[in-house]
Structure formats: C-alpha cells, structure tokens
Amino acid sequence: MSSTPTQISARIAAPVEFRAGDGPLLTIPEGPCQVIVEGGSAVLTWTEEGQPLSAAIPKIEFDRFVVSDAIILGTS
C-alpha cells in the first residue's frame, strides 16, 4: 500500500547542508521552504535569487535537522 506524500511549510533556521550527487556540500539558505516527505527521503524546495531550487535528502538526515532546530516545521 502506498502513502500520499505530505507537504509541509517550514523554515530553515540554521545551516542545512546537502550533497548534490558526488559534488561538494551545498547549503540551503535560511528562510522559508516547503518539504515533501515520502518514503525514506525528504525533498526541500526554496527560492534563491528568484529561482526555485530543490534538494532531496535522506529522511534520517532530515529528522536530525528537525531535532536540532535547523529546520522548523509548520512555519512559512
């Protein structure tokens, strides 16, 4: 049985880093974002310099950012 992805408004409040493929660590800037959690990953979307960007991170890593208050859920 498949579950419906959940979209959540959130705010990046401290450095949130992710790796794009095998490249260097990149940082999501502080500010509002949207999060879609599905299965074992979370996709974060945000706007930077007027351009929409996104990053997929493992759910366990996403949970660590939430626990450390780097990502604040339920805000816009």
Image (cartoon, rainbow, N blue to C red):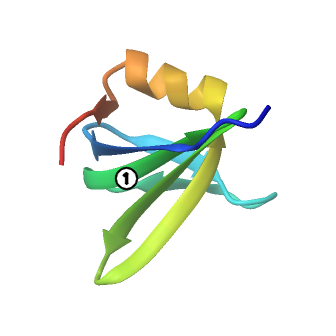
Residue 17: x %, y % from top left: 52, 45
Going by the picture, which residue comes out furthest to the top? Answer: 67
The part of the image, by quadrant, that contains residue 68 is top left
| Location of mark 1 (residue) | 34
Q: Is residue 44 above or below residue 39?
A: below
Residue 20 x, y percent position in the rendering = 69, 60
* Residue furthest out toward the bottom: 50
- Nearest the camera: 39 or 33? 39
User: Does residue 68 appear left or right of residue 44 in this picture?
Assistant: left
Picture layout, residue 8 above or below residue 67: below
Q: Position of residue 1 (x, y in %)?
A: 80, 31
Residue 71 as seen in the image, left or right of residue 36: left
Circle 1 packing at 10 Å, graded few (<14), some (14-19), many (20+), is many
Label 1: element kind = strand
Name the residue located 52 percent from the left edge and 64 percent from the top edge.
Answer: 54
Residue at 31% across, 23% down: 69
In the rendering, at what x and y percent does residue 46 appear? 37, 63
Give the farthest residue toward the left.
Answer: 76
Q: Which kind of residue does numbered mark 1 sit on? A: Gln
In the rendered structure, the answer to whether residue 27 lies left or right of residue 22 reads left
35, 64: nearer the viewer: 35
Q: Residue furthest front?
A: 1
